[in-house]
Amino acid sequence: MGIAETVNLSINSVQEGYRGRLLQNIILVGGNVKFPGFKERLLRDLKPMLPEYLQDVRIYMSPDPVSYSWESMSAVSQVIEPATFVTRQEFYDEGHRICLKKFYNYTDAQARLELPSSSIVASSSHSTLNSQATSVGYWTDETWSTPPGSHHSSPRPSPSNS
């Protein structure tokens, strides 16, 4: 399975109403995305897999994709309360149920219901962080730039439209 197929699989693992928004906010991070033509190839390979109504695909890449994930979370961590994060130990102890309890106010009994992990999209009710999926995270246009109150600069990547 290639990268375009993986992105398509990730997009299709969320509710249909969220798919268009996710496809408009694909962020490339990591050193491998610096290969020449990577962004263009991903777009070219992904679009034929999508239905006609989901053809508005936007791919973003920061000037430094190697450190962009760290820079972004560093900025977010300065403005979001620690209680809105799931620690490694919490996830190890409770699995995906911790997301249900923390972000959706499920009780322990409700969270014990077995749900397929692919149906869980980690999110926060805090206005700065709207949603992120396992391999396709996104920010809304309003909060892509440095969050209010942050002293850290994290530049908005430039989009690649069809």
Image (tube, rainbow, N blue to C red):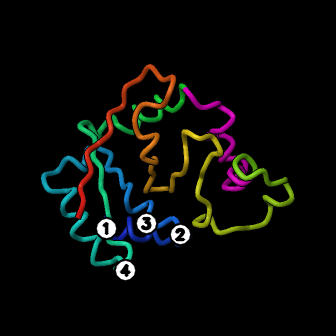
Secondary structure of the residue carrying numbered label 3: helix
Tell whether label 2 touches label 4 (CB within 8 Å): no
Measured from the top left, where is residue 147 in percent x and y?
48, 31
Tell whether label 4 touches label 1 (CB within 8 Å): no
Disc 1 vs disc 4: which is toward the camera?
4
Instruction: Give amino acid for label 4.
Output: Pro
Q: Mark 4 points at which residue?
A: 51
Residue at left offset 45%, top offset 42%: 142
Q: Out of 100 and 128, give the one closest to the viewer.
A: 128
Q: Which numbered dot is residue 20?
A: 3
Quadrant where the image shows the C terminus = bottom left
Instruction: Give amino acid for label 3.
Output: Gly
Secondary structure of the residue carrying numbered label 2: helix
Secondary structure of the residue carrying numbered label 4: loop
Quadrant of residue 160 within the rendered picture: bottom left
- Estimate how packed mark 1 is, as few (under 14), some (14 to 19) or many (20 or more) residues with alpha carbons within 10 Å: some
Earlier-in-chain disc, 1 versus 2: 1
Earlier-in-chain disc, 4 versus 2: 2
Tell whether label 3 touches label 1 (CB within 8 Å): no
Q: Which numbered dot is residue 79?
A: none
Residue at left offset 45%, top offset 52%: 137
Residue that extends furthest to the front in the rendered view of this protein: 142
Earlier-in-chain disc, 1 versus 3: 1
Instruction: Give amino acid for label 1.
Output: Ala
Disc 1 vs disc 3: which is toward the camera?
3
Task: State the predominant SS element of the stretch in magenta.
Answer: helix
Instruction: Give amino acid for label 2.
Output: Gly
Residue at left offset 24%, top offset 50%: 33
Measured from the top left, where is residue 151 in percent x and y?
44, 19
Q: Name the residue under label 2.
A: 17
* Residue 73 is one of the magenta-drawn residues: no
